[in-house]
Amino acid sequence: MMGESNFLDSVRKRGLSRMDKKQTMLFMMFCALLAVLGSLSLSSDMFWPHVSSHPITLTRHTPLQTPTPEPIQQRVPTPTTPPTKTPTHAPVLDYPLLFGNTHLPEIALTFDDGPNPYYIPQVLAVLQHYRVKATFFDVGYLVRAYPDLVRQEYNQGNVVGNHSWSHPELTLLSASAILSQLASTSHAIQTALGVRPTFFRPPYGAMNNIVLAQAESLGLTTVLWNDSARDWALPGVSQITYDILRLASYGGIILLHDGGGNRAQTVAALPAIITTLEYRGFKFVTIQQLVDDLQAPRSQSAYSTSSGRATFSTIALTEPVAASKRELYVG
């Protein structure tokens, strides 16, 4: 019995010692695990502040927000509100205008046969330098060829008028052909400027009842002149200047040319014409202003009537026209 009891005690002791060793091992492993977790926690505390100091790494991966496009209607410019007060202009005159109000120191510079791409910029530069406005009677096919020049004339405050499509002598044409010449030119000017012309000058000043009627049907006032220097014949700068100054009068309409040939003499004469007439007390106005300032237009017209309306056979208020000038506009 004693031997058996000693044997059991030794076995129990060995079992306890083995259990103690296992517990010790588990405890040590647990401590080691806690140490590892502690080091990881420490290293993470040092790492995350470093990352948070570089926010670019976060925004770099943020998807871009595509802006919502505006509706197309909002991109269209709002039309400018027209002024509440619009200038009132005189109605279409039923007679050809040779001059304006003879009681006012007004005078109108007018230029025919353009727009010429070489001389128009020079003429406009002189006008702009002296702050003078003029009226340009442009040829239709040249308006179509050089719309930018026509816009330049208009944008500088000048008036653009109708001078027929191809510069023929209108009194030699039928009524339908005259209407076509004038209507096509008015359309070309409207296409270039957005506004229709209200003034017309017949080539060579040649007109009759038929020409006048066709112009009036298109809402055009026919404009002639009473002051000319025959500058198209190239008489010289001094002669052009002398003739214009000699004929200048209140309400006068000056005829010069900016196209149809060499117009260097005309351009050179302009400064002396402008400065001398201004020194004499004249004010340069457009044909529109000249018509607006008429107080008694019938009494100032170029003819008298017995029935309230004039009749014409054929009028040619024009200087002799060189053959070369006529040929320039044929076709």
Image (tube, rainbow, N blue to C red):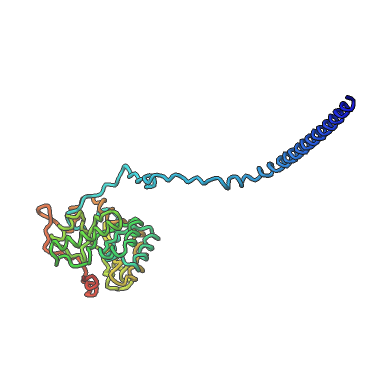
Comparing 223 with 278, the one in front is: 223
Q: Give the residue drawn at x 90%, y 25%.
A: 2
Relative to 168, does residue 68 appear above or below in the rendering?
Answer: above
Query: Looking at the picture, how far across and down is residue 135, in whole percent?
Result: 29, 59
Which quarter shows the C terminus? Answer: bottom left
Comparing 198 with 106, the one in front is: 198
Q: Is residue 282 visible?
A: no
Query: Residue 194's quadrant in the figure?
Result: bottom left
Q: Is residue 169 visible?
A: yes
Please identify the residue farthest to the left as the structure is shown: 307
Q: Is residue 182 left or right of residue 135?
A: left
Query: Residue 251's quadrant in the figure?
Result: bottom left
Please identify the residue farthest to the top as the structure is shown: 1
Q: Give the residue drawn at x 47%, y 45%.
A: 67
Q: Give the residue drawn at x 32%, y 70%.
A: 263
Query: Looking at the picture, how far across and down is residue 192, in whole percent?
Result: 30, 58
Comparing 56 with 237, the one in front is: 56
Query: Looking at the picture, how far across and down is residue 23, in whole percent?
Result: 80, 33
